[in-house]
Amino acid sequence: MRDKAYIVGVGCDGNVAVEEMLEKGLLEKCKVCAKTEHKIFDELIGEEHKQREGGDRFAGVADVEAMSPEEKFEFWQTQLSKCIRCNACRNTCPVCSCNKCVFDSAQYDTAQKANVTTFEEQMFHIIRAYHVAGRCSDCGECTRACPQGIDLHLLNRKFIKDINELYGEFQAGADAEELGPLTDYNLDSDIEPSDVHERR
């Protein structure tokens, strides 16, 4: 497939949050991104930009992790209860790419409908987060596209943080040849996540 694609790389200084540009400038995700070089391209327009010193992209995750179980439940319930099931998060996600999403199936009574129960609110986003776990490129478009302002990127970053801690540093999408830690498990040589915790 690569031989049928002509890739044009464009230097990236980060996306500008138009509605907030006068006040804040770059989007928050761009302030903590240290990966600005292009990995694959046939032609590069403009110059590669200098690496930025990445900030702590997991700061928000740490704040949630510091909450009590009850506080975490309340936080996510408040976030997810705002969902109107417009599917903007799913439709803008570069790795959510099934030909037909299970949530569009009439068989499960979930197709293109607003949530009517707390269970449905949680089910859609938690299943989607698990679906992209290990493949999320940390682009943050799910949060940017959400008209309700739900911080879905925070949920995905929690998965990224856990995967990095359990299996080693991994950046989805940085290397086209590298398999993700959740899809490249070797029974003979790889350790279980429980083994990592026992060693700490």
Image (tube, rainbow, N blue to C red):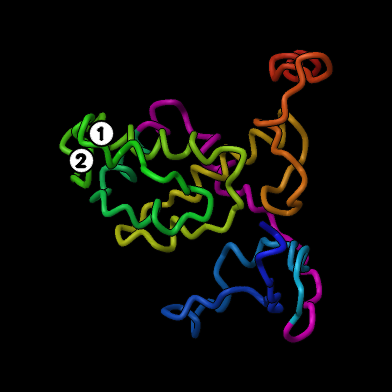
Q: Is residue 50 magenta?
A: yes
Placement of the C terminus among the 4 image quadrants: top right
Work out whether residue 54 or residue 111 is closer to the camera in this orientation and state it: 111
Q: Does the magenta stretch include residue 82?
A: no
Q: Do the residues labelled 2 and 1 touch (CB within 8 Å)?
A: yes
Which residue is denoted by mark 2 in the rendering?
A: 115
Q: Give the range drawn in magenta.
A: 45-73
- Residue ID at (76%, 52%): 175
Q: How many numbered badges does the structure rendering display?
A: 2
- Residue ID at (67%, 48%): 172
Q: Which of marks 2 and 1 is nearer the N terminus?
A: 2
- Residue ID at (26%, 43%): 81
Give percent across and percent down for residue 85.
Answer: 26, 49
User: Please, what is the three-letter code of the amino acid marked with disc 1?
Assistant: Glu
Task: Assess disc 1: are there few (<14), some (14-19) or many (≥20) residues with their C-alpha within 10 Å of its C-alpha.
Answer: some
Give percent across and percent down for residue 66.
Answer: 55, 35
Question: Is 155 displayed left or right of 161 in the figure?
Answer: left
Question: Is 174 displayed left or right of 112 in the figure?
Answer: right
Image: 161 above or below 88: above
- Residue ID at (20%, 40%): 115
For mark 2, give the secondary structure.
Answer: loop
For mark 1, give the secondary structure.
Answer: helix
How far apart, in angstroms, are the residues tagged by discs 2 and 1?
A: 5 Å
Which residue is denoted by mark 1 in the rendering?
A: 120
